Amino acid sequence: MPDANNNMVLVAEREYCDGAAGCSCGGGGAGQLVSETRHVDAVTWHTTDFEYDWRGRQIKVFPPADDAGRTVYSQTTYDNLDRAVKQERYLEISGSADRLLARSETYYDDRGRVYQTKQYAVNVDTGAVGNSLVSGTWYDAAGNAIKQQPAGSQAFTKTVFDSLGRAVKQYVGYDTDETAYADASSVSDDTIVEQSETTYDDAGNVLQTTTRQRFHNATGTGELTTPSGSQPKARVTYVAMYADEIGRQVALASYGTYGGATFSRASVVPSRTDTILVTSTEYDDAGQAYKTIDPAGREDRQVFDDAGRVTKTIQNYVDGVVSGVYPDEDVTVEMAYNADGQLSTLTAKNPTTGDQTTTYVYGTTLTDSEIATTTLKRAEIYPDSDDTPSLGDGTDGVFDRIEFCYNRQSQRTSKKDQNGSIHEYEYDPRGRMTHDRVTTVGSGVDDAVRRITTNYDLRGQVETLTSYDNATVGSGNVVNQVVFEYDEHGLLVKEYQAHNGVKDVNTPYVGYDYDTTASSGVLTKGLRLTSLRYPNGRLVHYTYGSSGSTADALGRIAAINDDDSGSPGDALAEYGYLGSGSIVQVDYPEPDIRYDLAHGAGDDPYDGPLDRFGRVTDLLWRDYDSSTDVVRVQHGYDRVGNRLWREDPVAASYSKDFDELYAYDGMYQLVDMQRGNLNGTKDGLVANSKTFAEDWSLDMTGNWSTYRQDEDGDGNWDLNQSRTHNGANEITQIAGVSIHVAHDRNGNMTKIPKPDDWSDHFDVTYDAWNRLVAVVDGETVIGEYHYDGSGRRIRRDYDSGAPGSSTGVDIYVHYFYGCSYNMMLLNYAS
């Protein structure tokens, strides 16, 4: 009889070839896996089939068809040594030849090493093959890869190895005329933009690294030198490492540029100074790094259990005792694990709010999921909740946790959040999420969007992101939509952004063009971006200097140009680089202004604008037409990079005191800022020059316990505000008053004090994705916000008179974005 306590379910089935005629093993013999079926639930499963050639090599993989019934399979071709030499993907077409979707090839030398790869352009509508991106690798006699050139790039990386096979020098550069194999081991005729050198001791421990970055105006070929050396000149920085007797790194000392002097590594670990940044590590008897000390001398510790898991971290360790009196000392987080080794509790110690414990509950059953297992996370319970690990609602009787359910493939099928909103997730047969459906909307949650649907193209790239007002698939209206179009290389060429309904012929889009220059079927410019079309139709161009220039060879933007009838016009910005990609100059020809980090007076033009560690210390914007500084901002730093002061000499020339002084606590959190006129030693303000000040006191998890502001620098605090937080770090009181702050159970702030009247508040609403959708002042809506399927805010409707004279929404702002989520265009309407 079946065991009533048996909670096992069928997850996967596999079929193997028996060697019979007609088997997909291709005659290669019995034992090959020919079919694998993965069960999603009791009635849904997806099957992947495999085919083999007569030598038993897997040549085809047929995954399940997608929701549109399309089967895209992969095919591998081998040489006589069983090496994969061609990878292809096809769309299976019944009754006709299958259509090629992708192709790549791999080439081997006589020693079996990969020396070249080719990635072809393929038109997915026709299967036509286009030009290819080619990468290359060169080897020395010992088999070390001494030169590597990425696909489609003229830039390379060359590496020099010692007799033990250790990399001792590495170069990044180019040589457009290099053709002989022997040239791969030489840089004498190469333009090098970055160079690194590594020194080892007899045990193989790294002793020192030296890094050289080519000056933006350097000339010549060959190895980089020094700021005072011959061309090509470079900025040089040094790092020394120190190991213990068994090879563990115990200290790292960063010397930066060493002031331009000749560097010699000290034999023992140096002391920490402002010019030598030393980080040290200590190990326990088990060999675990339990203590680190940073360049400022702050000590952080870790505690491990017998299984080597971290059970406690202590930042800014003093004595290990947690104290609310010193909230920036001994900042402690504790971890506990279950029998499966999973994190079960995470406790942030905080005497002010009480210890903050987040509980992670594992273990699904056939009641809540399609699979019963101890390894899947069933719930998260946050510190402000009294819900129990057994998933009870606690003494308050209120559901206040996140719960998860899964299918048999351990894919998350639903999430119920603290507000009670339930997301149900659907996947296509390929395992890709296709629908995020809000089937239950929690109390007070906006329901304008109930479903986000993702569709994929033949390559598997996202084709559409569509928001609907109905959770049921196939029902409801489209709220907004994003549509993506790709070229034959799989690069994004158009992104349509429809803010109201589906995409149509009038939908604005962002467009991208790429450099498809080719020679003998080989793409030579790496498909670099050449122009960008804004949603309003404006076109800007990215140019890469003259042919054969450093910018051209590296694919590095030399200028951004306006449009001139579809071709690059006047330059809007021109760039100068230190090394391979650090921008140190930006020239704006139209206003005759230059952003400049290369205005130092000595051999090293960056010494002064940058400190020895590469931090910006003298930022200059100069009007070179009139030879005047438009903006000049100078900074000083502590040993861990915190900004200590900001000096504004241009403002001072107009009798404005805009200098600033900063102070930090032991956790490097900003606790004090003063504005005025810095004194000569940059550690205080000149008497009676203060114009503004503010300070913070923070609890152990970084919440503001108090905030004070002196608006005119007269020494009297115009705002002196206390704040109280709960165990979830949510504000519960401001200045002892709680009626103007509130949060929902998800942690979203639903009452926000008015910035001009702390005795009143706005009411705020969120949707099921915790996105802010409405701000209300009493009965008046003063702001509404809309989002696309990727979570970007695409529209803001607001009251131009708020907060002082609220009359309702009268301005509508549309936002459009580029592929890197950068906002490209604002469109106002009233």
Image (cartoon, rainbow, N blue to C red):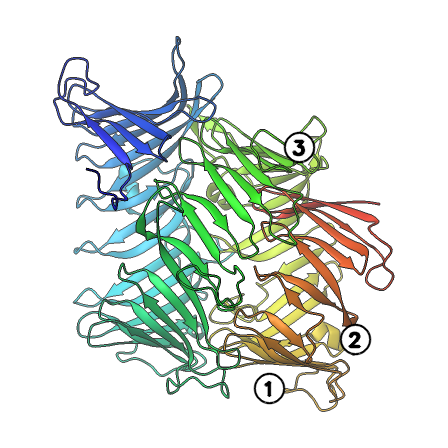
Q: Are marks 2 and 1 in contact (CB under 8 Å)?
A: no
Image position of 705 (left or right of 191): right
Judging depth in this view, the residue of 300 and 219 nearest the camera is 300
Can residue 76 be seen?
no
Q: Residues within 10 Å of mark 1 (few under 14, many from 20)?
A: few
Q: Position of residue 442 (x, y in %)?
A: 60, 51
Query: For the residue marked with disc 1, what is the amino acid?
Result: Asp
What residue lies at 42% left-to-right and 71% top-to-bottom?
Answer: 347
Residue 580 locus on image (x, y percent): 46, 52
Nearer-N-terminus badge (2/3): 3
Q: Is residue 88 visible?
A: yes
**Label at residue 374:** none
The quadrant where residue 523 appears: top left
Q: Report the amino acid beneath label 2.
A: Tyr
CA–CA distance in space, label 2 to label 3: 59 Å
Picture layout, residue 828 above or below residue 39:
below
- Between 570 and 129, the one nearer to me in the picture: 129
What residue is disc 3 on?
Answer: 477
> Residue 745 sits in which quadrant?
bottom right
Q: Is residue 152 above or below residue 316?
A: above
Q: For label 2, count other residues whose C-alpha is less than 10 Å away and answer few (under 14), some (14-19) or many (20+).
A: few
